[in-house]
Amino acid sequence: GVGESRSILAGTPSQQKVWMSHGDSVQQVPEGFEVLASTGSAPVAAFANEARALFGVQWHPEVNHTDFGQKVLENFLFNGAKLEPNWDTTNVIDEQVEVIRNQVGNARVICGLSGGVDSAVAAALVQKAVGDQLTCVFVDHGLLREGEAEQVERDFVAATGVNLYVAHETDRFLDALAGVSDPEQKRKIIGREFIRAFENAERALVAEAGVEGQPIKFLVQGTLYPDVVESGGGEGAANIKSHHNVGGLPEDLQFELVEPLRALFKDEVRAVGAELGLPHEIVGRQPFPGPGLGIRIIGEVTEERLNLLRKADAIARAELTAAGLDDAVWQMPVVLLADVRSVGVQGDGRTYGHPIVLRPVSSEDAMTADWSRLPYDLLARISNRITNEVDGVNRVTLDVTSKPPGTIEWE
C-alpha cells in the first residue's frame, strides 16, 4: 500500500503489486525520512528524504513482475537524481564504432555467429566499424534448432553482406561430448571446441587466400552485461554459471577479444540491431543458449537424442507462433529428460519413453523471470502433437518456477 502518491511513487496507484522478499523488513525510518509505502509485514517498504535526495524501496523495481517498477525508476532518475533522458541507440552505435576502430586498427577480425541476436548485432557493429576486415565464422555444431543453420546463412548475409565462412563441425562436438552429462562440463567442452573450430577456420581462411595473409588478431564476442554479472565479473556479483562466451575460455586463446555489447542489456541490443538495419527475424529471435540443445538434454548428448529434442522444440515453437504468442513469451526452452524413463500407454502396449519439459518464461533481461501463463488449449495441442509425432516421448510437463529460485535453462 502506498500513502499519498508522491516522490519516487508519483503517478502510481495506492495499491500495487511488487516483487519483494519478506525475509527481512525495515521497522522504522531514520530522522528526516518519511514512509512512502508499507505492506502487512513490512512497515517501511519505501522511504524518502527529498532534501538529501535519498530514496529507498524494499522491493525489486527492476523486474517485470513489479507493476510500476519502470515508473519508480524513472521518478528516481529524472526527478530524484535530476538526470537527462538522453540515451539512444545512435549514441551507442557511434561510440562503439569509434572504440572498435581504435582497438582493431587495420588488423583482421573474426566473429563467431551462433544464430542468436547477440552475436549477430555484435558482428553488424564490427562490420560497420571495419568493413571487410571482418570475416564471420558460423560453426554448425549440430546442437542447433531445426532450420537454424540455413537461417543464419541466408538471412544474416542478406541483411549485412558480411563475409561468411561455414564450418561443418557436428562430429567434432558430438565426439567431445560423448559420455558427458555434467552441465558445467558440457559448457566448458563446447566453449573449448568453439575456439578450436575458430582456429581451424582461421587457418582455412588464410590458406584460402593462397598467400601468407595477415593473421586474424581479434575475436568478436556477443557478451552482454547480464553475462558479465552472472559470471562474477560485476562488482561483488556471485558466479552463477560459466558462460562459454565469458568464462571457460582456454588459457591458450590466440585472439584478443572485441566485446561491443558488454555494457548492454538484451532489450538495448535488440534496439541497436534494429537501428543497424537487421531484420526482425534476427533481432526479434527468442534467446538460445550458446551451448545450444546440448544443455537442454539432461544426460549424455547423442545424435538420436538431439533429433528427438529438435522435433519437440520445433513443434512447440510452431504452435506458439500459430497462437500469436511469440511476443508474449520471452523464450520457451524445451528440455529432454534423457536419463529419465516414464511409463506410458500408447496403442495396446506400455511404453517407456522420455519426459519433455516446457519452460515458457517472461523476462526483460534474463536476470529475473517468471513462467508465462499459456492458455490450456495451447498447452494441450503442444502436448498432443509432441507425444503423437515424436517417437520416444510419452509425457509432456510444464515448469512453473520463477527465477529466482530456478534458472531459465534446466541444464
Image: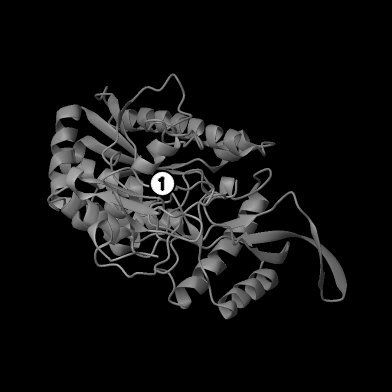
- Judge by depth and name the residue closer to the eye, 335 or 219: 335
Tell me: 395 left or right of 216: right
Q: Horizontal and vertical percent for residue 350? A: 86, 68
Q: Horizontal and vertical percent for residue 150? A: 42, 57
Q: Horizontal and vertical percent for residue 106? A: 16, 28
**Does residue 157 appear anywhere in the picture?**
no
Tell me: 275 left or right of 340: left
- Residue at the extreme front of the image, as rendered: 31
The image's colouring method is: one colour
Q: Quadrant of the C terminus?
A: top right
Q: Horizontal and vertical percent for residue 49? A: 24, 48
- Residue at the extreme bottom of the image, as rendered: 377
Examine the rendered structure and indicate whether residue 131 appears above or below residue 158.
Answer: above
Tell me: 325 left or right of 76: right
Q: Residue at x 19, y 34 (%)?
A: 100
Please, what is the three-letter code of the amino acid marked with disc 1?
Answer: Ser
Q: Residue at x 32, y 41 (%)?
A: 136
Name the residue that disc number 1 marks.
114
Q: Residue at x 36, y 55 (%)?
A: 61
Counting other residues with Cα less than 10 Å from the Cα at mark 1, is it few (<14), some (14-19), or many (20 or more)? many
**Does residue 318 appear anywhere in the picture?**
yes
- Residue at the extreme top of the image, as rendered: 252
- Asked which quadrant contains residue 261, the reply is top left
- Judge by depth and name the residue closer to the eye, 234 or 223: 234
Q: Secondary structure at mark 1?
A: loop
Examine the rendered structure and indicate whether residue 329 appears above or below residue 347.
Answer: above
- Residue at the extreme right of the image, as rendered: 349
- Judge by depth and name the residue closer to the eye, 302 or 71: 71
Question: Number of marks in the image?
Answer: 1
